[in-house]
Amino acid sequence: MENRSRLDYLDNLKVFLTALVIVHHVGQAYGNTGGFWFFTHPGTRVPNLGYFFFFNASFFMGLFFFISGYFFPGSFDRHGAKKFITDRLIRFGIPCLFVLFIMEPVLLYAHHVTYLSDKPFFSFYLLNYFGIGPKNEFFTGPQYNLSHMWFVEHLLIYAFVYSAYRLIAARFFPSFRITKRLSLHVFAVIGFVFVIGFVTDIVRNPLGYPMDRWTGLFGFWQMEPAHFPQYVTLFFLGILAYRTGLLESITLKRNILWFAVGAGIFLFTIIRSHIIGRAAYSHWEYREALVCAGACIGLLALFRTLFNKRSAFTAFLSANAFGAYVLHVAIITPLQFLIMPASESAVMPFIIVSVLGVIISFMASAAFRAIPGMKRIL
């Protein structure tokens, strides 16, 4: 792996991705989206936000998984299995429980009383959220879920899987070490595109899991199967990058051009869709994999080249990125209810809530982390 002092760009990239997630979720209320959101803009939506959602979904959570995977091996090496798992149960498990039992039901209740029917909170909490009690015509549950914390739940599950792998490997293959240095090659990217494209196409079409269709695997593992092949592969590649020096090869300055490749394929598809319609998205899964590879490689190279710096301000943002991710939905949803537009257009509310949402989310994280013991959680 690279020296930790030379990885400031990864911290800065995580801050950027966190802000992108916040703006993405703000846009759910104001653009054309296939997903549910707590607030619905009453006027004219911003149709072009659909392209913003579409492009983001191609890569941004996958890149989060790659970065998270990169830091797993070093943490396990330093702390061992017991502390590795304990730390993640605290840092990942407690925020997940907070969202599941407090944040999500409160926000869903606000949506319910605004758009469906007025009822006491605890009645909604038991019946509509957890599905406990007699059903009536206003029953819309059970609705319990982890909301945006599905990503953190995945990391917690992967932590258990990774720990099991390391313990088994140490027990039965004690001399096994990954020592081969790897570098980025075009043919490896092509292989990634075809494999991820092929598997994703099977998941979305024959298996019937299109984008924005969520499920609970084994009754608890919240996931969007349409992107799961990408997520788990990039997480594995992050682990591999730590052991093989692959990240150093990916982040060479010349690889910034890969972002142009990914963005170019995306723009080409959008332009064609205005000419030939939905046929432009035929076999989109393969092009999406290329968009993902291009955006991930390009952003990693860009941030190492231009943003591999640390200041008091970037250190503050980095320290509060995870807290901002956890808290942001509880920040932006009230802002969306409060900031109603002077006209039907959703453009200004989207901009205002995006800016305020990012700023307040990071500030709220800092406020919570000032409480004794909270830094271990957030």
Image (cartoon, helix red, strand yellow):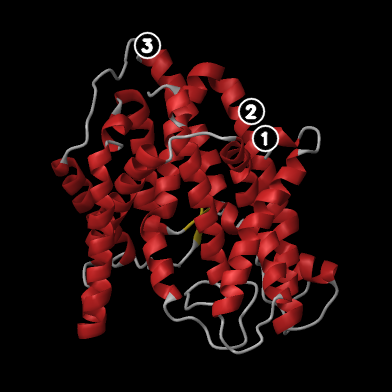
Please give left or right for residue 90 compared with residue 63 in the image: right
| Residue shown at 33% from the left, 37% from the top | 237
Q: Dividing the picture into quarters, in which one does residue 141 lie?
A: bottom right
The residue under label 1 is which amino acid type? Ile
Residue 235 lies, with reference to residue 172, above or below; the image says below
Label 3 or label 2, whichever comes before in sequence order: 2
Residue 212 lies, with reference to residue 12, above or below; the image says below
Residue assigned mark 1: 90
Instruction: Pick whichever, 97 or 377, lies toward us.
Output: 377
| Residue shown at 38% from the left, 24% from the top | 2
Residue assigned mark 3: 174
The 10 Å Cα crowd at callout 1, few under 14, some 14 to 19, many 20 or more, is some
Q: Which mark is residue 48?
A: none
Image coords of residue 170 (percent x, y): 42, 15
Instruction: Pick whichever, 206 or 213, lies toward us.
Output: 213
Please give left or right for residue 219 compared with residue 108 in the image: left
